[in-house]
Image (tube, grey):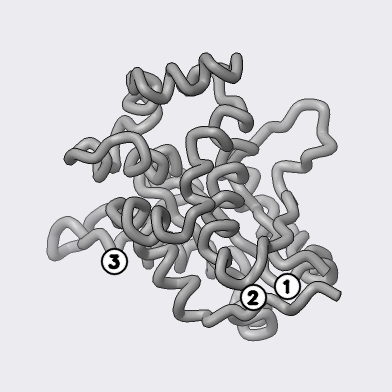
Amino acid sequence: MHDFALVTEGATDHAILKNILIGYFKEQREPDVHREHPDPRAEKQYGGWTLVLQYLKDKKYQQAFQLNQYLIVQVDTDVAEDAGFDVPRQNEKGKLSFAEFVQNVVERLRNEIGQQDMALYGDRFIFAIGVEQLECWVLPLWFNDAKGEQTVNCTNRLGDCNQLRDELKKKNYRWIRKEEKDPLSYDLATREYRKRGTLVTQGARNPSVAIFLEELGRRNIQLPAVE
């Protein structure tokens, strides 16, 4: 059985989360991380939040739990207010706090799953909410100033990072930009998260990374020994 299966908006999001999981569980062992969605066998790997919601609506996770201990579901909040997702950023009292907004997005996903299956699978679901994009989770590795804590326009910020461009060029990997997202480039950009110390200090500068790490900590997950 795999330790984790990832249901993400895209293949690049999988690359980011996998490196984070490797770093987080460094003191135990390297986790076995399976890419559940988008399907890695598909010739064209279409992604997006609509397909994540459809995956939950179709209850495909029921089969996934037969082969995976935990299922991590990822969405970005840049689409939260889009029709079909419908998670507002404010209520009658005004703008929601960061934590309240993230929790409301989680509740949206939980509602798609339904109370019965949430009760059945419980803490085997783990939610990774990227505010506003999972690319923002990468910024702390490449910017030591306030840019590393930004939560908007993050793909462009990464694309404009000369240091990252130089590292990608050495490997002949593609630059990170909206028009061209390559998992190899994202894997390289987040490799330092495989060091637990870097993850819990640098990574946690991003508020939604901090929430995700806190959620992993709350679960107190112990990976079984590999025989």
Q: Amino acid at mark 2?
A: Arg
- Closer to the camera: disc 3 or disc 2? 2
Q: Are marks 1 and 3 in contact (CB under 8 Å)?
A: no
**For residue 105, side relative to residue 14 (left or right):** left
First along the sequence among labels 1 and 3: 1
- Mark number, residue 169: none
Q: Quadrant of residue 199?
A: bottom left
The residue closer to the viewer here, 149 or 195, is: 195
Q: Give the percent coordinates (x, y) of residue 163.
A: 37, 23
Disc 2: which residue: 124
Residue 62 against residue 41 in the figure, above or below: below
Whether the residues at callouts 3 and 2 have beta carbons within 8 Å, the answer is: no
- Mark 1 falls on what kind of element? strand
Mark 3 neighbour class, 10 Å CA radius: few under 14, some 14 to 19, many 20 or more: few
Q: Given the current orientation, which residue lies at the most extreme bottom position?
A: 119
Residue with the most extreme left position: 93
Mark found first going from the N terminus, 3 or 2 = 3
Q: Residue at x 82, y 34 (%)?
A: 42
Q: Which residue is mark 3?
A: 100
Q: Is residue 144 visible?
A: yes
Give the residue at mark 1: 69
Closer to the eye: label 2 or 1: 1
Q: Label 2: few (<14), some or many (≥20) within 10 Å? A: some
* 219 displayed left or right of 208: right
- 164, above or below 55, in the image: above
Query: The disc labelled 3 sits on which kind of residue?
Result: Glu
Give, as a three-letter code, the residue at label 1. Gln
